[in-house]
Image: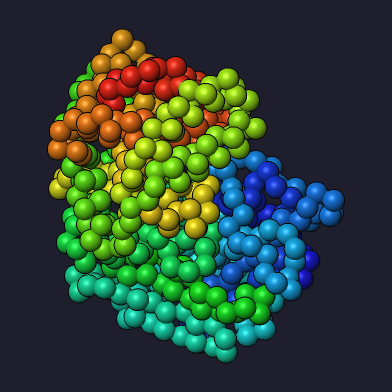
Amino acid sequence: MDPESADQLLRHLAQARWFAGKGRRAEIGSVTPLPWLTDSSTWPAVRVEIVRVDYPPAEDPPTHDLQPSEDSPPTQDSQPAAAGTQPWPYELYQLMVAYHRAPVPGLLHAELGRRTVAELGPVIGYDATQDPAACALLWQMLLDGHQTRYRDSEISFHRTDISELAPDAVAQPFTGQQSNTSVMFGDQAMIKFFRRIELGANLDIEVHDALGRAGVRDVARLYGWIHAHWLQDGTPVEADLAMAVEKLASAEDGWGLALDSLRTAGDFSEDAAALGTALAQIHHALRGAFPTAEIDGRTTESLMRTRLTVAADVAPVLTELTPGLESAFAQLGATTLATQRVHGDFHLGQTLKTPHGWRIIDFEGEPAKSMAERVALDSPWRDVAGMLRSFDYAAATVPGPGAARWLASAREAFLTAYAGGLPGLDEQAILRAYEADKAVYELVYEVRNRPDWTAIPLGAIRTIANEGDHDGIRPRR
């Protein structure tokens, strides 16, 4: 790619809400086009292009110094440097590109740049997820199970049970997405295009597929996915590019519903109980679909201690609280933990309430963790702790005389429904350690991204570090 086109592309990436490289020195390392999804007589001409974004060390002159955004989560280098390639970290991004011969009214916001493509001549590239004509082509390819190959690359559309899907469904991009891009197709389906590509199987697709086969109705139905093989820096690689799932009609976001409940002095306990039941059913299905194991609690204790040490470098206030937190972690050392595949990033924002009940979404784990960390087996209490911490965030976001009562009832209802009764002392100790570990993670995130929010996780950390006995239900205030 010529320097001018590379500059255009990097400027586009830097402005995208889903780009995770904000605040880092970046340059375009390479652009790998996958096979054309359209023939030479079809316009727009559509293909996927895999963009490698390099992050040179400070002593090397950068192409750009990208400014951070409040919307950007903390990033982690998702790909190691391959042998014989650049020595610095990089990330892979997917661009689904629609090339037109002339400007398209209404797509100015989605323009990627103007260039000459060997097979097409002078063209204008647009983000295909924003182009209704391109989206219609992609929809039909999914329905047809389209597959195309050229030289060392291949792209394939895989489908499950899609007999009920309408071929003429109208595409409508969803503008609220951040880490990925979603396009709605009528009232039936949604295709989520993954922006930052992780090599190998996508966890969200893998889990949705397994839960669908198990007959679990607490998640959206999986209709299909897009997969690709290509050569990256001379090495054969593969990755999932997108997934098609059931569109949850009339769905309401769990976080927004919780805040509304607090603002109106309502009671969230019934919804909290329903979420606890849904999580228990999903955990049960995951135990049947994926491997399980029992591990020495001292292993998890050690990992939590290590994360605390690293976190204290970012948030020095943790230093004075370290003894109390390590005491909470030490309770794990006397246990044997039953581990399995879990959600990994469970909170109110990962839930939707539909007319048919609650649905749980986004099984990709915490975005700041490596793939190895996210796919690793863990105690299901991690997901329980994640939701309890989310209740705490909600209550702190809408403070008032009834917030503590709301929090206590939501925690108790969720825990009771999940565990089939109040957790015993051993379970409370495990949960306490996981809540502490999650709050430490939250504090690091807030220090780096939203300093005004640090009081929320810090309050929970202080409570856990300073308390002796813990009943597993008491509000984190």
* Residue 37 screen position, x and y as percent: 48, 80
Work out which residue is located at the far front of the displayed protein and give it: 334
Q: Quadrant of residue 207?
A: bottom left
Residue drawn at the location 37% of the way across and 59% of the way down = 204
Residue drawn at the location 63% of the way across and 85% of the way down = 119
Front position in the image: 340 or 81: 340
Residue 477 left/right relative to 304 = left
Residue drawn at the location 46% of the way across and 39% of the way down = 301
Residue 321 drawn above or below residue 183: above
Q: Is residue 258 visible?
A: no
Front position in the image: 381 or 25: 381
Residue 282 left/right relative to 49 = left
Q: Quadrant of residue 340?
A: bottom left
Q: Quadrant of residue 476?
A: top left
Residue 368 left/right relative to 185 = right
Residue 75 left/right relative to 356 = right
Residue drawn at the location 84% of the way across and 54% of the way down = 61
Q: How many marks?
A: 0
On-image quarter of the N terminus: bottom right
Work out which residue is located at the far bottom of the displayed protein and give it: 151
Instruction: Give the image's coloring scheme.
Output: rainbow
On-image quarter of the C terminus: top left
Residue 236 drawn above or below residue 254: below
Q: Is residue 288 visible?
A: yes
Residue 84 drawn above or below residue 220: below
* Residue 378 screen position, x and y as percent: 37, 49
Residue 166 drawn above or below residue 438: below
* Residue 120 screen position, x and y as percent: 62, 82
Front position in the image: 110 or 59: 59
* Residue 109 screen position, x and y as percent: 56, 54
